[in-house]
Amino acid sequence: MNTIEKCEQLVKEVYKHFDASHDFQHIERVRKNALEILETYKHADKDIVELAVLLHDVSDPKYANDMEKSEETRIISLLHLPDEKVKHIKAVIRSISFNGGNEEEPNTIEAKIVRDADRLDAIGAVGIARTFTYGGAKGRKLYDSSETPRSNMSVEEYRLKETASVTHFYEKLLLLADGMLTEKGKELAQERHAFMESFLHNLRKETGELI
């Protein structure tokens, strides 16, 4: 069993406890996106990209418990990777989260690839499905016309206020296509972004009261 296979086996045990918005199918889709983008960046480190994809949500604050050691740290320690590779993987993972617009700037091509790949899975048809899956798991409203989408949020404000699922589109998802960092990511994001806009247009027509 190689390192990628061992990591995959370990992370599957974590993701099976998450809801369907962040389960292992999400990881598989992000990996597919990442490998497609990677085709245009032959010099990028494929192992770093795959390991970062596999690990990027295991210690997600939305699901993290109060364990002394994070799942990310625990699993990485079991892979026995060189220190430089560990630092690189962790830097990639840190650069992925949106954090209400307070994201860390990616400074390697691997980080740009993984961030675009993850954000592609947050938009389009799958992104819509994931948004309402997560909202349902957290008991959130489908929509709330009294809510005003926020901007210039702190990380804490972004994570702690439980807005309706549709509000999330305006606070994050509709912003992602313009923030893609790779040419392939930008290309793939356009159709997905347009699909979300069409969906929200129809939703407004059907409800007559959305944002």
Image: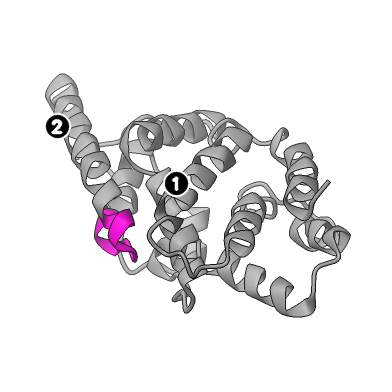
Q: Nearer the viewer, residue 126 or 4?
A: 4
- Residue 130 appears at what percent x and percent y? 45, 34
**Left or right: where 39 falls relative to 55:** left
Q: Which amino acid does label 2 sit on?
A: His
**Left or right: where 57 falls relative to 118:** right
Residue underneath mark 1: 33
Magenta range is: 174-186
State yes or no: residue 175 in magenta: yes
Quadrant of the rendered image containing residue 10: top right
Tell me which residue sits at (69%, 55%) in the image: 59
For numbered disc 2, what is the local secondary structure? helix
For numbered disc 1, what is the local secondary structure? helix
Q: Which amino acid does label 1 sit on?
A: Asn
Name above or below for residue 116 compared with residue 170: below
Q: Decide: few, some or many residues near mark 2? Use Cα within 10 Å; few <14, some 14-19, many ≥20.
A: few
Quadrant of the drawing holding the C terminus: top left
Q: Which of marks 2 and 1 is in front?
A: 1
Q: Which of 97 and 7 is in front in this view?
A: 7
Q: Which of 156 and 186 is in front in this view?
A: 186
Name above or below for residue 152 compared with residue 51: below
State yes or no: residue 157 in magenta: no
**Left or right: where 76 falls relative to 135:** right
Q: Decide: few, some or many residues near mark 1? Use Cα within 10 Å; few <14, some 14-19, many ≥20.
A: many
Residue underneath mark 2: 201
- Residue 149 appears at what percent x and percent y? 28, 52
Tell me which residue sits at (47%, 63%) in the image: 99
